[in-house]
Image (spheres, rainbow, N blue to C red):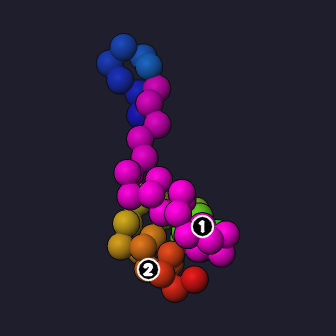
Amino acid sequence: MKDRFGFFWQITAKRMNELMESGNEAQRAAVMGAMMGMVRFDIAALEAAFSAS
C-alpha cells in the first residue's frame, strides 16, 4: 500500500502473525501454502489450514 506521501506500507493481519508464530512446522507450512494462493487474506481459510495440519 502506498500512502499520499509516497511511502509504502506492508499490512498484515494480526491473526496471520499469531498463526505463523505458534504451532509446529507442518501447521506453519500449511498456513503459508494457503496464503500463497490468496489475493486477499481469508483468515477463516488460514485457520482451517492450521487446524487441519
Which amino acid type is marked by label 1? Arg
Image-quadrant location for residue 36: bottom right
Residue marked by disc 2: 48
Which amino acid type is marked by label 2? Ala
Image-quadrant location for residue 48: bottom left
Where does residue 2 sit, x and y in percent of width and height?
Answer: 41, 27
4 vs 26, nearest the viewer: 26
Q: Residue at x 32, y 18 (%)?
A: 4
Q: Residue at x 38, y 66 (%)?
A: 42
Q: Residue furthest bottom?
A: 52
Q: Which mark is residue 10?
A: none
In the image, which residues are magenta? 8-28
52 vs 41, nearest the viewer: 52
Q: Residue furthest left?
A: 4
Where does residue 22 sit, x and y in percent of width and height?
Answer: 52, 63
Residue marked by disc 1: 28
Image-quadrant location for residue 7: top left
* Element carrying mark 2: helix
Where does residue 26 sit, x and y in percent of width and height?
Answer: 65, 75
Residue 25 horizontal side relative to residue 39, left or right:
right
Query: Where the N terminus falls, by quadrant?
Result: top left
